[in-house]
Image (cartoon, rainbow, N blue to C red):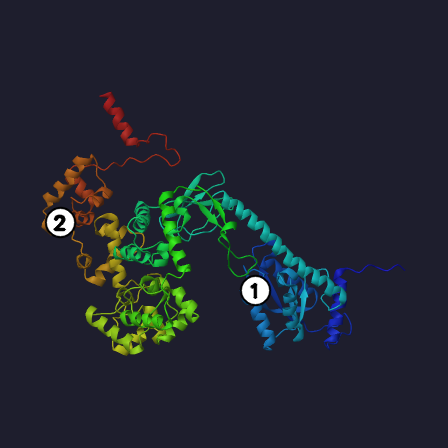
Amino acid sequence: MPKVRQTSKTLHRQRFKQLRVKTGESVETDAAVAAPIRAAQYVRMSTDHQKYSTLNQSAANHAYAEAHNMEIVRTYADDGKSGLSIRRRDGLKKLLSDIQEDAANFSVVLVYDVSRWGRFQDADESGYYEFHCKKAGIQVIYCGEQFINDGSPLATIIKGIKRAMAGEYSRELSVKVFAGQSRLAQMGFTLGARAAYGMRRMLIDQNGVAKRILNPGEWKSITTDRVTFVPGPSKEIATVRWIFKSFVHEQKTELQIANALNEQGILNAQGHVWTRHGILQVLTHEKYIGNNVWNKCSRKLDAKVACNRPEIWIRAENAFEAIVKRSLFDAAQVIIQSHKLRAVNGRCRRYSDEELVQTLEDLLLEHGYLSRSLLEASACPCANTYERRFGGLTAAFERVGFAPQYGVRRSQITAAGRPRGLSAEEMLGGLRRLWKDRGRLTRDIVNESKAVPHHAAYIKQFGGLSHAYKLIGYVPKPVRVRPIGHRLWSDDAILDHLRELWRKHGHLSYDIVCAAEFGPSRNTIINRFGGMRPAYRLIGFKSKRFRPQDLTDDQMLYSLWQSWRKHGRINQAMIVQTKEIPSLHCYVKRFGSITKAYERIGYEVDRRPHCRRGNPHKDRRKSRTHRRSVQKSKRN
């Protein structure tokens, strides 16, 4: 009889039976009912095609497990992770860690294909991680491949080819992506760069039509759209031009310019104080003369960031509107290059280790803490000098006995005013003094004061602000529990909300507070401060409206009649927006309703129905009673 060709499913079953025999499991007959083999699956998805999604991989792994009497008990996943290295792949790290520590409760690992295991540029690295599993007695099975990973010579050859193909795919894709990005950069479009100070990002469609300004943190959602730079607010443009003129014409240093901006309260693009390095970035940024420069630094195939030579930079001249003259920019570059030349020739001062340490001691004695931003904002040597001399800022700080505190966001700690590096008793002492000055303590009060560390420092030191309160004997005022779904508003948050409404509308009233889409209600403010006027006094607002008890009925009605005569009509919205007449609440409280107040001055409310929706070009349809009255008047 001719031999029947076996399918891949049959081959998998036969190979798996052999594998079970090698591991000591009994395989008597196909009909014998055996306990399912415990297995784990590893799924990974980067930015490849949708067919490599984790859900599709998991479905293929479950189908394979069901066909081979397996039970998937654990899943290790890496969503949106590149397979070029294992550095950011926490799922694969956890899998290997469990296997090496004998914490794996499975004997098989299911992977969709070789590329999901990784696209390592060195094929031996992929085999190294798989060898760890095999050494612990755990078999790696590729469910979507045509070969069986049983350790045979044929499987080893095919697997090596697959690993090399997976790595080659990444290299080819890197070349194609770089070519496409280079073309876009030469056309003047930005590739993910943040807007510099004085500039904004403009979203442009595929036809070159501007769509909108992108706010910080926003990205385009359509692949055919592009992003370019446009001039920002006029105040920021004036600041940039002043920086260049001060540096070129007035011969000011970067540090002097940064201190001048900080004294005026002007922050940089990230909302931080200006530093010497930040001013230098502005002076050397070619975007201010309309040039789009790209590929200064590159990081290909998940390697280390490399600074490229200026010869291979991609530069697009006059890509967007310039805000600084080319002659002024070139003059600034000449001055900067002369400073660098003096440093190369050795004419700049070279500090000894003792002088650098003494500078740090003086800075620590003056401010009470040390940080990179503080070094940049002072007249001492830059942070890079300390890093090259002592091997890092932390090692330099240890020379003067200062241990930096980590875990606090840099955006919350400015370079001036707020102490850091205090002991627990010093932190509690500052909290006691703040309590004595303000009469109470809240998180907002702690953050606003620069005499004490940030609230995050207290949380790290004592486990929370409430624990720090107990140590100094402060008992915070109990907060009234509200129903579920309502926000617990603090006193400071309520006052900040009233200030925002005051700034937006120019005045405050009951109706403005009630009409706000987000914020505490009028009753919340009254219960917390004993009324609206005490809350107004706390924020410095003085109501220009007359109180109901200060006006007679005739005076209130006369104000309403004057507004009707001035505008030809009157409604509730006009009463709320007009400052010269009492509020709508006053009329309702005095006359029972605003309609009764209208009747007292002889004003009739127009009750005619408006035109139907969807017919904006048709005239308003008059009511039946109105049409009959018009016809009757014509007859007469």
Residue 110 x, y percent position in the rendering: 65, 66
**Picture residue at 73% right of the left edge, 63% below the top:** 157
Between 233 and 207, the residue placed more toward the observer is 233
> Residue 222: x, y in percent?
50, 46
Compared to residue 279, the image places residue 76 above or below, namely: below
Can you see residue 142? yes
Q: Which mark is residue 77?
A: 1
Q: Most extreme residue toward the right, as rendered?
A: 1
* SS at mark 1 in the image: strand
Q: Tell me if 273 is positioned left or right of 509 in this view.
A: right
In the image, residue 327 sits, relative to residue 478, either above or below, namely above
As shown in the figure, which amino acid type bears the numbered disc 1? Ala
Q: Up-down: is 361 above or below 549?
A: below
Query: Is residue 324 visible from the viewing direction of this image?
Result: no
Image quarter where the N terminus lies is bottom right
Q: Quadrant of residue 204?
A: top left
Q: Position of residue 61 (x, y in %)?
A: 64, 63
Give the alpha-carbon distance from disc 1 to disc 2, as whole Å. 67 Å
Residue annotated with mark 2: 546
